[in-house]
Image (spheres, helix red, strand yellow):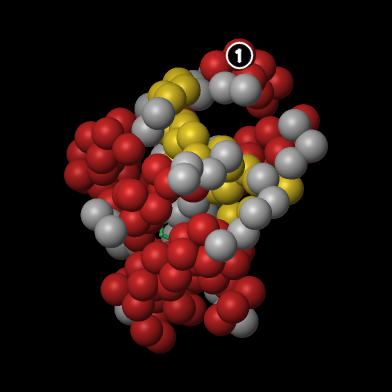
Amino acid sequence: MQMNHIILIGFMGAGKTSLGRRLARARHLTFTDTDDRIVAKMGMPVTAIFDRYGEEYFRGLETKVLQELLGEKKRCVISVGGGLPMRGENQPYLKKLGRVIYLRAKVETLMGRLGRDNSRPMLRGGDLRTRIEELMAKRQDTYEKVADLIIDTDGKSFERLILEISEKIS
Ligand code: S3P
């Protein structure tokens, strides 16, 4: 049976966590974030997990968190790490958890949000714009394929985005 959660997917810096918190508040739902769960479980930041155990290990933890969420009943807004939907195995889990919303953002918008960030191992090294463009080229189609709803976020306030989402999902 399909569950009734609201799942936010999208690139790093698309606003999954900040919008997710506000959306949950507006709809009186609980908010949860897959990265936060992993960090709490491991007792170390995402960068340290990548450094010590590598990306594949982190991806395995993401799948475990999804499986955990499938066992939880309380309806919530779930923000998932930008790379999580890329693992084929995770896609049916996302669909089973509920409505999947892709928060789409242009590279320009992401640049503005990620410019001073060094907490994201996937963006390390080289020119930031090139890195974002390369990763986005690999991910975009999958985000669109997995999503039930695509929301363009560029230049929109949180209030507007919450309204837009609320008009489209009950
Ligand atoms: C990642 C995105 C991050 C985090 C990790 C890897 C990715 O989450 O899971 O750094 O591969 O896109 P956010 O999308 O919340 O930044």
Count of picture labels:
1
Residue 100 drawn at (x, y percent) = 45, 36
Q: Does the rendering let one see residue 104?
A: no
Q: Residue at x 59, y 55 (%)?
A: 33
Given residues 40 and 5, the one toward you in this image is: 5
Determine whether the residue tagged by mark 1 lies in a helix, strand or loop: helix
Q: Residue at x 41, y 24 (%)?
A: 150
Q: Does the rendering let one see residue 150?
A: yes
Residue 121 drawn at (x, y percent) = 40, 65
Query: Residue at the front extreme?
Result: 1
Quadrant of the image for the C terminus?
A: top right
Q: Residue at x 37, y 84 (%)?
A: 53
Query: Residue at the bottom extreme?
Result: 52
Q: Amino acid at mark 1?
A: Glu
The answer to whether residue 142 is left or right of residue 120 is left
Q: Is residue 166 above or below residue 77?
A: above
Q: Quadrant of residue 26?
A: top right
Residue 159 drawn at (x, y percent) = 70, 21
Q: Is residue 121 above or below residue 107?
A: below
Q: Residue at x 33, y 49 (%)?
A: 92
The answer to whether residue 111 is left or right of residue 70 is left
Residue 124 drawn at (x, y percent) = 35, 62
Q: Is residue 104 above or below residue 94?
A: above
Q: Quadrant of residue 145?
A: top left
The residue at which mark 1 appears reads as 167
